Image: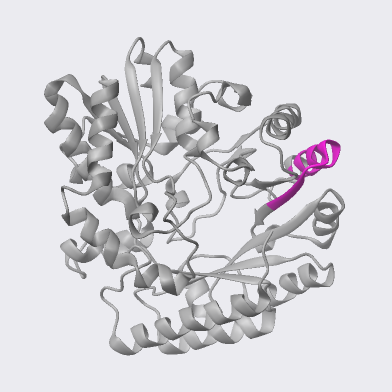
Amino acid sequence: MLESLKNKKILLIEPPFYRLFGYKRYHYPFTLTLVGTYLEKLGNTVRIYDADRPTSSCKEYSRSESRDNYYIYEKVLMDKNHKVWKEIQDKILDFQPDIIGLTAITAKIDSANIIAKIAKDLLGKNVKVILGGPHANGMLDMYPGYNFGENYDHAITNIPGLVSLKPNKRLIIDYEKYSAKNFSSILTSSGCPNRCTFCCHSFEKGFYYRSKESVIEEIKEIQTKLGGDIIYVMDDCLFSNPKHFRDITSAMKETGMKFVAGARLMALSQEKLRLFKECGGQKIHVGVESGSQRILNAIKKNLKVEEIIKRTKWIRDLKIPYQAFLMVGFPFETLEDLKLTKKLIEKIRPNFISLNQFTPYPGTQIYKDYYMDKKIPFKDLFQLNGNVQVGLSDDIKEYINGMFDFVDDYNARNAFSV
């Protein structure tokens, strides 16, 4: 479908979310730069507008502070005269695009819908508005106002030659508006072999691996243009493919680039961890999710609690800092499950904890099993974005709120960052 777009003016927009309640996030619209680069190669005039770029008033929040300030986001959604919507109108009118492409995670879908309406009100039939991303793929029938929804798998990973795109072709972003920290990231592969029932990656297909040579080229470009000596590898499963893991760790060692990466615990071995550290690995992110075996089984994590304890000990024994990702608020979770998760934290002692509240992503198995039949009122469904609690009992809410406070205190005591 993308190949048919030529000689068009295309505006790709990252809808605002974090910015609207004052949260300072450290990333840029990576996916849009990949799509934009390809569309530009086809002969289109492409501009990327990051409406979620932090302003000078944005701050770094703890998880509890982020949840406490979420109401500000809801107020901005209701205020059609807010300056952010005026800013978006001005960008659209200035560029006069033939096509507007919006990418939206579930939490951003409300602001994406507002942008789509703004575009149609301003340009009418002269503009096509395209919604992309996992949310669009999971909920195509919800958004008849868009021209079409695009499957992430088709739009991104099936672009011919994507893995060989030269990094210096990402010319569409205004680099000077970001710090080097924003751009210290790289994607060396795409795809995940796992099918966790809560994860939006569960309905993706296929695996794509970049060559070691192309990764080295991009790292050198980052070093030359942006500076810095540490990079975040965004891959879902860097450790899962042994050859690719060796190639990428070797690339890091050859370029002298230190790096942070995510890993599935069952893909780890002591040998891989030693190689990770020897080649400049600074920190590992691991998905733990829960300390309850019942929950791990229900979400098809394919992970045993005893393996979590054993493999995180491997990481600690090698003195590699690690961040554990946990999730609470599943529709079938009990107080006992939550207490087991808190107890596990005390056993595995991560350097940093990322505690997230479950969100029912459209297209996932949990969404199909628990939300498609409207067990939670549809109007409330997408408030479940990690900041608002809907459909949970009072005792569960109270315990979860206590866990967020516990995690904030835990992280403050450790005061660790890379």
Whether 255 is among the magenta residues is: yes
**Picture quarter with the N terminus:** top left
Whether 72 is among the magenta residues is: no
The spot of residue 254 in percent (x, y) is: 85, 36
In-image side of 3 versus 210 (left or right) = left
Observer able to see residue 407: yes
> Is 314 above or below relative to 167?
below
Residue drawn at 50 percent across, 32 percent down: 157
In-image side of 115 versus 104 (left or right) = left
The spot of residue 279 in percent (x, y) is: 84, 48
The spot of residue 330 in percent (x, y) is: 39, 73
Residue drawn at 83 percent across, 62 percent down: 270
Looking at this view, is 347 or 68 the one in front? 68
The count of marks equals: 0
* Quarter occupied by residue 298: bottom left
In-image side of 339 versus 305 (left or right) = left
> Is 10 above or below relative to 187?
above
Q: Main secondary structure of the magenta part?
A: helix
Q: Which residues are magenta?
A: 245-260
Looking at this view, is 386 or 238 the one in front? 386
Looking at this view, is 307 or 360 the one in front? 360
> Is 169 above or below relative to 355?
above
* Quarter occupied by residue 122: top left
What's the image's color scheme? one colour
In-image side of 271 versus 230 (left or right) = right
**Picture quarter with the C terminus:** bottom right
Residue drawn at 13 percent across, 22 percent down: 125
